[in-house]
Amino acid sequence: QVQLQESGPGLVKPSETLSLTCAVSGSFISSSYYWGWIRQPPGKGLEWIGDIYHSGNTYYNPSLKSRVTISVDTSKNQFSLKLSSVTVADTAVYYCASRPDGYTNRWYADYWGQGTLVTVSS
Amino acid sequence: SYELTQPPSVSVSPGQTASITCSGDELGDKYVSWYQQKPGQSPVLVIYEDSKRPSGIPERFSGSNSGNTATLTISGTQAMDEADYYCQAWDSSTVVFGGGTKLTVL
């Protein structure tokens, strides 16, 4: 059973970089899974940010691609999200999630972290 | 960009069948997943690849996908099924979520 736990600052100033980490337990990050991020603004729906394989292969949401970097640290069994130049519109609960490796058109997230609220405010 | 459209709300009486739809252009040619989200909790995968149930998901949850519409069906709906439900598909190298449907059991 994969368990995911997000961590990082709950408050970020506008124009700065949001940084979050997701610790993976119950599985090696080098296993046949992609590791990614999904966010949910308060009271709104889900938005996919992107995901990464342990080899470094990444997929990003085109609408966020210019500001997003997802990386993996196999030595710590964790992966990270950086979102640059944030605005109030980036205020959301950020979830880390995993999906099985395979055909991307069959994409689905089977394990989710508990989520962490990040507020963008001065 | 690709869009998935869900009704904002669906109501059902306990014990009855609830159907939540998700519409998109030629959606039947794609694989659809469904997630259940209760207030203050993380989403939970209830259906993947149109109609497959993950381990631990009750048999009353089922899915179908054809033409332009995917449907999540909950048979014998229970009070514990009251939640928001999101459909999701992959299109043009990106993951797309529907806007979500609030299922009320009353």
Image: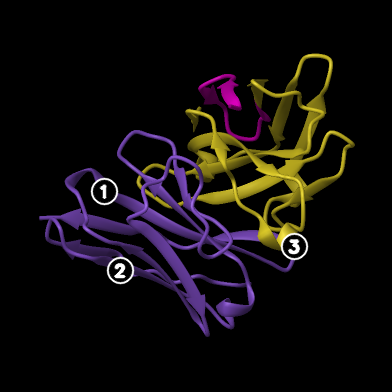
Foreground label between 3 and 1: 1
Q: Are marks 2 and 3 on the same chain?
A: yes
| Residue A72 lies within the magenta run | no
Mark found first going from the N terminus, 3 or 1: 1
Region of the chain picked out in magenta, as a range: A1-19
Residue B19 in the image, given as x and y percentages of width and height = 30, 68
Q: Is residue B27 above or below residue A58?
A: below
Figure quadrant of the N terminus of chain B: bottom right
Q: Colour of chain A?
A: yellow
Q: Position of residue A98 (x, y in %)?
A: 64, 38
| Residue at 69% over, 54% down | A61
Chain name for mark 2? B
Which residue occupies the extreme right position in the image?
A55
- Sequence-earlier tag: 1 or 2: 2
Quadrant assignment for the C terminus of chain B: bottom left
Alpha-carbon span between mark 2 and mark 3: 29 Å
What kind of residue is marked 3? Ser
Check disc 1 and report its element: helix, strand or loop: helix
Q: Which residue is mark 2?
A: B19
Residue at figure coordinates x 76%, y 58% from the top left: A103
Q: Quadrant of residue B93?
A: bottom right
Q: How is the image coloured?
A: by chain
Q: Secondary structure at mark 3?
A: loop
